[in-house]
Image (spheres, helix red, strand yellow):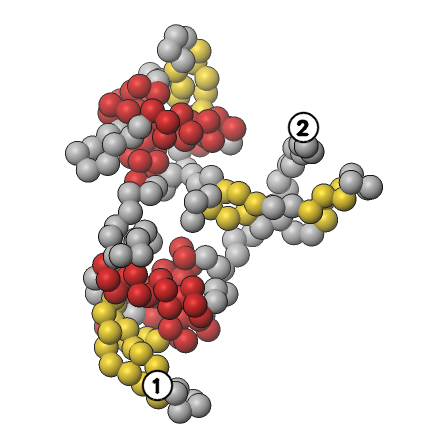
């Protein structure tokens, strides 16, 4: 078995990078019908030009933005302008072909159910697969188990025991409408000093 560490987080800082931040930038730049370029987005975020251009391409295929002519940059290079057509608060997850992905929707539905009145006496994994499922997105047993495991590890749930096992969301951890996200990171561990070196940057798993 390899090295296993238990890390206690003392403080966290949100890094202004990633597609959630890029989407927030696009919404701000495109407010009230203003046009913007990929370079404008790039200057306001820390992601690469390639990542931003690909994100805009997908958003265009899905109808969230559309081309709006061109402008000439400071070096005489033409830059495509974009117009924001739809501005949902949550970032749309768009596939390469312009389809909307269901990724994250099952967690949102499960979280909604946990926060609602039907779960106040506790819930099981089977409850999540039934009551959190909608006609559009199903909450599978595997998805429910994974989400509950993460919430339990994060201290969100009270284990009520029983067979099948029941949980309840702690009132103090009903933090808002958006579901907690599972993050993944890489750390540099010095085997000689038994220490972790450098900042630990965690990214949303699967994103």
Dot 1 alpha-carbon crowd within 10 angstroms: few under 14, some 14 to 19, many 20 or more: few
Q: Is residue 79 above or below residue 197?
A: below
- The mark tally for this picture is 2
> Of 12 and 98, which appears nearest the observer?
98
Q: Is residue 77 above or below residue 36?
A: below
Q: Which mark is residue 4?
A: none
Quarter of image, res 115: top left
> Of 194 and 26, which appears nearest the observer?
194
> Of 13 and 130, which appears nearest the observer?
130
Q: Label 2 vs label 1: CA separation?
A: 55 Å
> How far across and down, in percent of the image, does residue 81 sit?
29, 77
> How far across and down, in percent of the image, does residue 198 sit?
69, 52
Disc on the earlier residue, 2 or 1: 2
> How far across and down, in percent of the image, does residue 89 sit?
30, 54
Q: Is residue 171 above or below residue 197?
A: above
SS at mark 2 in the image: loop
The residue located at (68%, 32%) in the rendering is 2
Pick the quarter of the image with the N terminus.
Answer: top right
Q: Residue furthest bottom?
A: 76
Quarter of image, res 30: bottom left
**Is residue 179 visible from the viewing direction of this image?**
yes
SS at mark 1 in the image: strand
The residue located at (48%, 67%) in the rendering is 48
Viewer-side label of 2, 1: 2
Q: Which mark is residue 1?
A: 2
> How far across and down, in percent of the image, does residue 133 sit?
24, 30
Residue tagged 1: 78
- Left or right? Give the position of 131 relative to 53: left
């Amino acid at each position: 078995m390899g090295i296993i560490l238990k890390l206690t987080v003392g403080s966290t800082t949100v890094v202004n990078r990633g597609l959630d931040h890029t989407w927030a930038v696009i919404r701000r730049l495109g407010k009230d019908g203003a046009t913007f370029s990929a370079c404008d987005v790039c200057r306001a975020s820390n992601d690469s030009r390639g990542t931003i251009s690909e994100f805009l391409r997908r958003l265009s295929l899905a109808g969230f933005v559309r081309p709006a002519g061109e402008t000439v940059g400071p070096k005489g290079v033409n830059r495509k302008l974009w117009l924001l057509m739809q501005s949902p608060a949550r970032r749309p997850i768009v596939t390469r072909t312009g389809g909307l992905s269901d990724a994250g929707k099952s967690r949102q539905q499960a979280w909604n159910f946990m926060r609602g009145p039907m779960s106040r006496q506790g819930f099981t994994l089977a409850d999540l697969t039934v009551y959190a499922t909608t006609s559009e997105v199903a909450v599978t047993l595997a998805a429910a188990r994974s989400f509950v495991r993460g919430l339990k590890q994060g201290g969100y749930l009270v284990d009520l025991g029983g067979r099948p096992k029941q949980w309840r969301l702690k009132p103090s951890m009903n933090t808002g409408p958006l579901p907690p996200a599972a993050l993944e990171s890489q750390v540099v561990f010095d085997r000689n000093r038994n220490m972790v070196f450098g900042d630990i940057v965690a990214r949303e798993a699967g994103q």
